[in-house]
């Protein structure tokens, strides 16, 4: 038997061990990525946590829900479900958040469809606040804000303007 033939089994074993070692070393990388994704998801508040933190509704709830829906438009359905058991102040804030989210995410047809379906399944105060939130976000993004303090052309910059229940008629204009 030649010397090369005697070394062949050692060579095969060495190559096999290299492949096994590479596979073992790469597995933790995938696990680390999964752990990082889970950790990031745990740092983000859930809709239930946000609603519990803001039982009185208001601009803070609107902003928090807007942030959640902007990150994940599929949460719009959860917002609709949560609104059914929410107080009137929370429903108003949820509707305003969905209205503002629909303007911010207008370029995404999937997000727009998810928000529209959620609003259609929501109670009427949410639908009313949705329309007000949508109008407010549209005015703000186009530089037509009521305060007259628009500096620069808002292109894509959206300022949260709180909508409150009972103030719906204060910005309407009557034809004369």
Image (cartoon, rainbow, N blue to C red):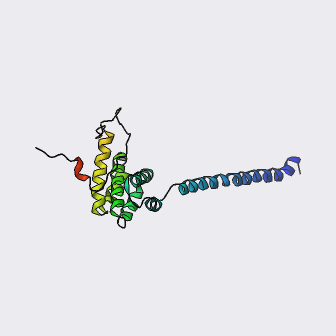
Q: Position of residue 112 (x, y in %)?
A: 34, 52
| Direction from residue 8 to residue 89 in the image, left or right | left
In this rendered view, identify the residue nearer to me: 145 or 130: 145
Which residue is painted at 71% across and 55% down in the image?
A: 24
- Residue 27 vs 81, above or below: the answer is above
| Direction from residue 102 to residue 30 in the image, left or right | right
- Residue 68 vs 139, above or below: the answer is below
Q: Position of residue 46 (x, y in %)?
A: 48, 59
Q: Where is residue 163 in the image (x, y as percent from the top left)?
A: 32, 51
Which residue is painted at 77% across and 53% down in the image?
A: 17
Which residue is painted at 38% across and 40% down in the image?
A: 157
Q: Quadrant of the C terminus?
A: top left
Res 146 quadrant in image = top left
- Residue 171 vs 122, above or below: the answer is above
Residue at the bottom extreme of this rendering? 85
Q: How many marks?
A: 0
In this rendered view, identify the residue nearer to me: 81 or 73: 81
Residue at the left extreme of this rendering? 176
In this rendered view, identify the residue nearer to me: 87 or 21: 87
């Amino acid at each position: 038997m030649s010397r090369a033939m005697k070394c062949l089994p050692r060579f095969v074993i060495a190559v096999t061990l290299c492949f096994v070692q590479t596979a073992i070393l790469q597995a933790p990388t995938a696990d680390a990525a999964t752990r990082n994704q889970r950790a990031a998801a745990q740092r983000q508040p859930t809709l239930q946590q946000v609603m519990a933190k803001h039982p009185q509704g208001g601009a803070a709830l609107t902003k928090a829900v807007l942030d959640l829906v902007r990150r994940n438009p599929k949460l719009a359905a959860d917002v609709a479900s949560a609104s059914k058991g929410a107080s009137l102040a929370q429903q108003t804030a949820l509707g305003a958040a969905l209205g503002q989210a629909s303007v911010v995410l207008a370029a995404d047809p999937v997000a727009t469809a998810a928000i529209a379906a959620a609003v259609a399944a929501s109670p009427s105060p949410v639908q009313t606040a949705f329309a007000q939130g949508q109008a407010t976000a549209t005015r703000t993004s186009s530089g037509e804000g009521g305060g007259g303090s628009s500096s620069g052309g808002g292109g894509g910059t959206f300022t949260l303007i709180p909508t409150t229940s009972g103030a719906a008629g204060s910005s309407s204009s009557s034809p004369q």
